[in-house]
Image (cartoon, coloured by chain):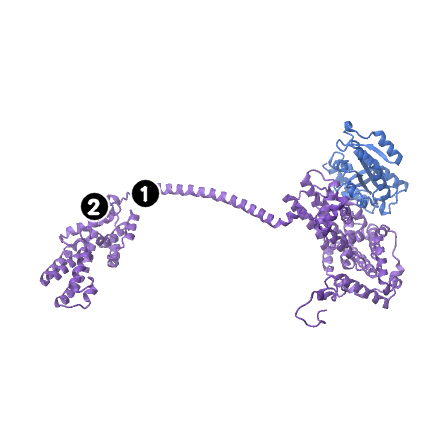
Amino acid sequence: MSAGPYNYSYIFKYIIIGDMGVGKSCLLHQFTEKKFMADCPHTIGVEFGTRIIEVSGQKIKLQIWDTAGQERFRAVTRSYYRGAAGALMVYDITRRSTYNHLSSWLTDTRNLTNPSTVIFLIGNKCDLEGQRDVTYEEASKFAEENGLLFVEASAKTGDNVEEAFLETAKKIYQSIQDGRLDLNAAESGVQHKPSQPGRTNLNGDQAGVKDNCAC
Amino acid sequence: MYATKQPSLRINQADLKCKNGCGYYGTANWNGYCSVCYRNAMEIERQNRPRSSQARPESSKNPVSEFTKFEEKKKQQTDKKTKCLKNLTVFRKSSSAADYVKPEKHINRRQVNPDADKLMTEFLCKYGHFEDNLRKDFLKCVHHFTNQLCREINVKPIDELAETAQKFYNLYNSRVNSNPLYQNLTPEVKADLEDFFEKHVMITLYSWLFCPSSTNDEEKDLSIQDRIRKLTWVNAQHLDCCISETSLEVRDLVFTAITDLLGMDSVKAPQEKLQCVVKCCRSVVEVLQQCQGGPVSADEFLPALIFVVLKANPARLKSNILYVTRFCKEARLMQGEGGYYFTNLCCAVSFIENLTAESLNLGEQEFDDYMSGRVTTVSAWDSALVACEGMHQLCEHLTLLKALKEQHVTIQEEKNKLMEDIKELKNHIKSEVASIFERTPLTIKPRKTPLPCQADSKPSTGSLMANVALAMQSADKSKLNLNITPCITATIPEKVLESLNSSVFDECNLESPEDNTNINAVLSKVNYEIDFSDLSTDTSTAEGLTPDKRISPTPSFTADPFSPIGANCCVTQEPLIPLSVPLQMPSGKESERKQNVSVFEDVTDNQEEETLLDKLDRVQDTPVTNLPLPLNPTKTEYTGFSKQGSKIPSIPCNTGDFHSLETSNSKRD
């Protein structure tokens, strides 16, 4: 399995932003912890905050950076944004204040990332329907106005978590295919692993390893 | 310099200060300047030197007279470096590189590089098994890159150097991935080789690329250090982080994190520095896991890291961060654990730099008070640090006590075990002894019971009395009926004094000159005679006593004449007799002596030589009659006694050293 980390074509860097306590880390854990679950073929990396997924037959390593959401760190957390291909903007549907802050988060993201960065809006804690403070329609409208992808998810139950991450990856991959994303630019947040001589052999070997994988 | 100064016994404070008068201390190593002024001076010198030999774009634009202007420009460039860094596509001007004469000193310095050997060893160790061509290619690339950078080090601003470095990393990366030489390598090895390429070059050039004199990195270091020093009062509560400052485990982990962070300054390669940051951050994550349990989010992580940075106040923090930012492979900083944690560290540092009252949830006034030192707090952390020594000792002592307690318990257990063992052994011995007794009944006591004169004998002096009785028996057997005054000392000396003018009755006294009557002289003679006879009787009676014992009704004694008990009896028996003399009937040697004494009395009193001589004869006769008895039985059995017998006269009768004998007796009993 040592060859695992190299068994992918792209690396996408994501950041998760949003107010403190909206469940950014929980979403990340929900997503990455699955690497030990049944869908083994998709999950090889055991690296820090990473998971390897497959989009259109291409193995993509998602590298997700959790960020501190406190207002006081807002000014200094800009370096997180550098080179992010995808930004997951999270709010808590049971707390209106977290929703109200979205516009400032969005401004930061737009300013600090390149235009091709995919921004995905996630309304977390949708399992707490009874305490809902922000309606789906309202958030959906906000997303539409700002050209964001939107989904309501639950880190607790895992609803839509996978979808949000995968959808973002698909969108980024599409940008690459369209040529909107410059792979050579360090800021793109995408690193392409060029196909190498001897790669086919390696892939064969890795497939064998994968089949033997106990997970 | 002190050498140039007038010799004086005392060095003034001013003498120690920087020659520039900036207020800092200078050292002889820096020509009497402080580090900053020395650096500036060297800078000026350096600016002057290359100008003479070669034209440099910067220096030509910025004459030395306008040095400050030049510095300003440098600063601006440094500020822009982040932007420049991003621009990977910018290429080095190859023409300009060709213009510069390669300074030979770099080559020399590189050869002198202390890490060169280490690097080569590591290289051979890691890749020694590779093909020669591959290794040669690697080293060729390394040398090419190193030389290239060397040429540019003093020429280009640091940001351009960083770009060059990044470009070279990429070049080597594409070479590794495209050159047929490398095609047989696995991706891991390729990545490893690229990393080593970076490491090799950076360690070689470390002293020129780290905190270069052309930048104000050092100033930044000093300012952040000063800043952190001013912020010592900030505690975990201010940062809203849940580090429990009083917990010992947490504090240990925080110390580990701090140590890791401090270690960043001591390694050279950017990747190694990054690794230190990762280690530090992992410890921080552990701290948080310890404090709150469960997964750690960035919301909690960043404040904790800020706290650690504040408490660590690492040396050359800013220089290290800038160095890594400039010369670490870009991809490494953009992704992976190292990149993530390094980004966090940068955030933490910039938070500290821009820290305001608001960011600590404090009022403006309160913040100012803290910063100016008007108000000081004793935070749990500080007090923990102060109490650290005591706490550590306390903890150590507690552990020591615990260990001692455990030891004590085991010792107790072992003691009990030992006690049981002893008991067992005792019982075992008892039973053994009992069985032996059963097999061979050996009892000494019965021998006392049939003895006479038991009415008089006290239980403690049982054997003594027995001996006395034995002596009596022997006396009876020798048929000596002597009426002797019981107390020698009381009666005799008085009388002697009367007649012999104050002298204790003794052989010596008898010899000593006196008022001398003829009778006295005769008496002394007589006394000698008596003494000799006395000795002869002594031995005879002594020998005569034991056979009596043997004849005595004790059956066991006859059974085992060689037993120490028997021998002891012989010894004790003799000296004890005189002591018992005042109480009991005189017997044995002493009785003879008494006889002599009484004879002497008689002589002194009556002054009749004839009677004395008669009496002496009688005295001498009595043992003779006694003699044949003891000698008859097996004489060989008496070796023990005869040995002891020679000692008998030496046992002091006069001193009355009774205790040792008694104890030995009681022991035997």
Q: Is A135 placed above or below B109 here?
A: above
Q: Is B292 placed above or below B193 here?
A: above
Q: Could you give the CA–CA distance between mark 1 and mark 2, rounded to whole angstroms?
A: 34 Å
Q: Residue A131 is drawn in which quadrant?
A: top right
What mark, if any, has residue B217 been given in the picture? none
Q: Position of residue B157 (x, y in %)?
A: 84, 58
Q: Position of residue B128 (x, y in %)?
A: 73, 55
Query: Mark 2 falls on what kind of element?
Result: loop
Q: Nearer the viewer, residue B378 or B166?
A: B378
Please, which residue is most extreme toward the top here?
A130
- Position of residue B329 in the picture relative to residue B494 (left or right): right
Q: Position of residue B80 (x, y in %)?
A: 85, 53
Disc 2 residue type? Asp
Q: Colour of chain A?
A: blue
The residue carrying mark 1 is B436
For the point 85% across and 55% down, the residue is: B76
Q: Colour of chain B?
A: purple
Instruction: Work out whether mark 1 precedes mark 2 in sequence or the reverse, and give the earlier one.
Output: 1
Q: Quadrant of the N terminus of chain B?
A: bottom right
The residue carrying mark 2 is B456
Which chain is home to disc 1?
B
Q: Nearer the viewer, mark 1 or mark 2?
A: 2
Q: Residue A149 is drawn in which quadrant?
A: top right
One can see residue A56 in this view: no
